[in-house]
């Protein structure tokens, strides 16, 4: 499994766990900073669409 797919699953599991990021990352054997990086990255991507959109501009 690729790291991104693994982190997507872990972030989803974290959100339903009710634990803090520190406790969750410790229980999974992941460094807090690594988990926090992926958590913020995936949340930012969920809010900000990636890529370009074609916009119709009428003058």
Image (tube, rainbow, N blue to C red):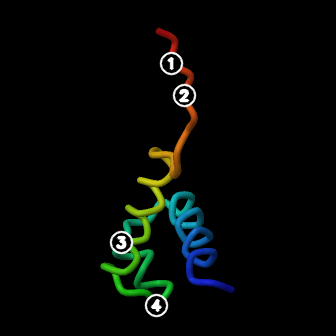
Residue lying at the far front in this picture: please name it. Answer: 59
Label 3 close to label 4 by CB (< 8 Å): no
Where disc 3 sits, the SS reads helix
The dot on residue 29 is: 4
* Mark found first going from the N terminus, 1 or 4: 4
Check disc 2: other Cα within 10 Å, few if <14, some if 14-19, many if 20+: few
Q: Quadrant of the N terminus?
A: bottom right
Label 1 close to label 4 by CB (< 8 Å): no
* Mark pair 3, 1: CA separation: 37 Å
Q: Nearer the viewer, residue 56 or 13?
A: 56
Residue lying at the far left in this picture: please name it. Answer: 33
The dot on residue 57 is: 1
* Mark pair 2, 1: CA separation: 6 Å
Q: Which residue is mark 3?
A: 37
Q: Which residue is mark 2?
A: 55
Looking at the rendered image, the disc whose residue lies closer to the viewer, 3 or 1, is 1
* Mark found first going from the N terminus, 3 or 1: 3
* Mark found first going from the N terminus, 3 or 2: 3
* Mark pair 1, 4: CA separation: 51 Å
Where disc 2 sits, the SS reads loop
Looking at the rendered image, the disc whose residue lies closer to the viewer, 3 or 4, is 3
- Name the spot of residue 59 as percent of width and height, x first: 46, 9
Label 2 close to label 1 by CB (< 8 Å): yes
Residue depicted at x 43% and y 87%: 30
Residue lying at the far bottom in this picture: please name it. Answer: 29
Q: Nearer the viewer, residue 16 or 48?
A: 48
């Amino acid at each position: 499994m690729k790291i991104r797919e693994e982190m997507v699953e872990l972030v989803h599991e974290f959100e339903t766990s009710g634990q803090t990021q520190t406790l969750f990352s410790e229980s999974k054997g992941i460094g807090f900073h690594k988990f926090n990086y992926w958590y913020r990255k995936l949340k930012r991507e969920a809010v900000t669409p990636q890529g370009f959109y074609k916009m119709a501009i009428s003058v």
